[in-house]
Amino acid sequence: MPLDQRRLRPMTLDDLPAVMALERLAHSHPWTEGIMRDCLKPGYSGKLLEWDGPLLGFGIWLMQLDECHILNLCIDPSRQRQGHGRYLLQWMLRDAIALGARMSLLEVRVNNRAAIALYEAMGYAEIGLRPGYYPSKQGREDGLVMALDLQYLRALPETP
């Protein structure tokens, strides 16, 4: 199936079972259903990425003033490194810009090299470190804080 047949749509409460299944598949320390449910409340935004079968991925972000905080970007592990994360992130940022975002911030595990590479390719830069931010099998893992000035992304490509 061609990549241009990927479909994005808003996340709803009815999507929670599929979202939680993917969250558990993709992460060693997944969010709880309660956290995910809270991210469906006003102020948060969520998109599902669908393409050729079960849920391919989802993204959740929060707008605070003129900042877009990327909270969760999740792609099915068997479909990662195929451009789906970049596609979803570009659409999340496009939505945030339409809502007035001028800056995007996120945290990422220091050992998540694939995600860091994606964020750097999108223009994010490291601006800080949160020691012990994430739970891990060895106790705690540091989180990189990354930022992207969205003023330079006003002209995102139409077909990422």
Image: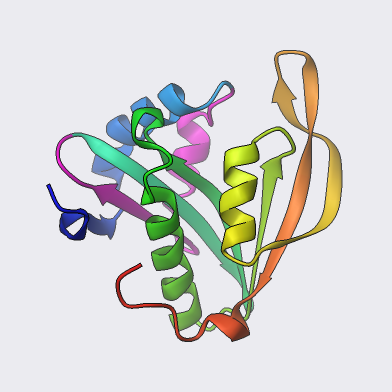
Percent x, y for residue 106? Answer: 66, 55
Q: Is residue 33 above or below residue 43?
A: above
Q: Position of residue 129 (x, y in %)?
A: 85, 47
Split into 4 quadrants, where in the image is the C terminus? Answer: bottom left
Residue at 15 percent of width and 57 percent of height: 5
Rendered residue at 59%/23% (across/down): 29
Magenta part of the chain: 29-53
Kindly identify the residue that appears in the image at 79 percent across and 24 percent down.
Answer: 140
Q: Residue at x 52, y 38 (%)?
A: 35
Give residue 127's quadrant in the image: bottom right
Left-right relation of 35 to 141: left
Relative to 101, is 96 on the left or the right? Answer: left
Compared with residue 124, is residue 149 higher up or lower down, i.e. above or below? below
The foreground one among 160 and 143 is 160
Q: Position of residue 70 (x, y in %)?
A: 57, 56
The answer to whether residue 154 is visible is yes
